[in-house]
Image: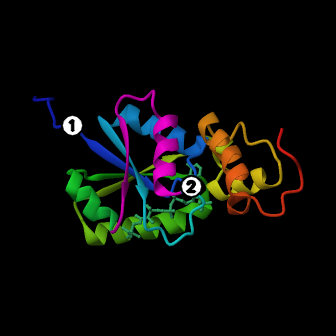
């Protein structure tokens, strides 16, 4: 039996606007399973991101710096085209709750239709992150809530700086001062 096989490169795509502890947990767990994990930040998102793609990439790189087999990059266009350019056949997605399922199921089928040799792998989130989303973090922050258990320090610091530079981009109607 020949157990040698090619290294498997997986891609974990998303908006990461900004990266949260929930995303980090998924990336860490994927890195334990696959030889290489590329965290791929979508550039031309239909969403209106709070952070530029460069900022999102920088924060994500900083948050994942300790994991040797993880790299972060940005992409635009179809995910499957980007994956083919990297020679990757594995998409990683996190599942937080049943409410994610329908959207994820549809996306996985669409990607499968576009590229049948690419498989989607789902990693179920840790329960403590099941309520997290980037928008929820920004919303809590906007009203002065404590986000220290939700995002890495680099993101929290960036958000604080951002408020001082561009108060209207994240924070609207802020009611409580930041500590
Ligand atoms: N922890 C915390 N939050 C999580 C999470 C986790 N484990 N998993 C998902 N989320 C949150 C994100 O923070 C995000 O929150 P937000 O909406 O408040 O910003 C939300 O869940 C979903 O975001 P994300 O995982 O980034 O997905 P997306 O819908 O923004 O992007 C892509 C998904 C990038 C994979 C998809 O749009 C894509 O591939 N686009 C390229 C075009 C393409 O190929 N289209 C054809 C396929 S449909």
The CB of the residue at mark 2 lies under 8 Å from ligand 1: yes
Q: Residues within 10 Å of mark 1 (few under 14, many from 20)?
A: few
Disc 2 is placed on an element classified as loop
Is the CB atom of the residue marked by disc 1 within 8 angstroms of ligand 1's nearest atom?
A: no
Where is residue 118 drawn, in percent x and y?
A: 27, 58
Residue 115, can we see it? Answer: yes
Quick one: 34 or 158, which is closer to the camera?
158
Quarter holding the C terminus? top right
Q: Magenta residues?
A: 52-77
Q: How is the image coloured?
A: rainbow
Which of pointers 1 and 2 lies earlier in the amino acid sequence?
A: 1
Which residue is labeled 1 in the image? 7
Q: Residue at x 37, y 69 (%)?
A: 109
| Secondary structure under the numbered disc 1 in the rendered image | loop
The picture places residue 82, in percent across and down from the top left corner, at 28, 59
Vertical comparison of 47 with 22: above or below? below
Number of numbered markers = 2
**Residue 67, quarter of picture:** top left
Position of the N terminus by quadrant: top left
77 left or right of 49 in image = left
Between the C-alphas of marks 1 and 2, the distance is 30 Å
Residue marked by disc 2: 17
Residue 164: x and y in percent read 72, 50
Report the side of 140 relative to 108 (left or right).
right
Residue 67 in the magenta stretch? The answer is yes
In the rendered structure, the answer to whether residue 128 lies left or right of residue 176 reads left
């Amino acid at each position: 039996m020949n157990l040698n096989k090619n290294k498997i490169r997986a891609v974990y795509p998303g908006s990461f606007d900004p990266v949260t502890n929930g995303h980090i947990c998924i990336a860490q767990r994927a890195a334990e399973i696959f030889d290489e994990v590329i965290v791929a930040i979508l550039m031309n998102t239909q969403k209106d991101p709070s952070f530029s793609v460069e900022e999102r990439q920088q924060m994500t790189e900083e948050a994942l710096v300790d994991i040797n087999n993880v790299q972060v990059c940005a992409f635009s266009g179809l995910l499957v085209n980007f994956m083919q350019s990297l020679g990757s056949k594995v998409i990683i997605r996190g599942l937080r709750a049943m409410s994610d399922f329908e959207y994820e199921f549809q996306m996985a089928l669409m990607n499968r239709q576009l590229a049948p040799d690419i498989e989607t792998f789902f990693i179920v989130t840790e329960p403590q992150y099941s309520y997290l989303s980037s928008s929820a973090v920004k919303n809590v922050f906007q009203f002065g809530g404590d986000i220290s258990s939700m995002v890495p320090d680099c993101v929290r610091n960036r958000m604080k700086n951002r408020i001082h530079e561009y108060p209207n981009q994240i924070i609207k109607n802020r009611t409580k001062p930041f500590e």
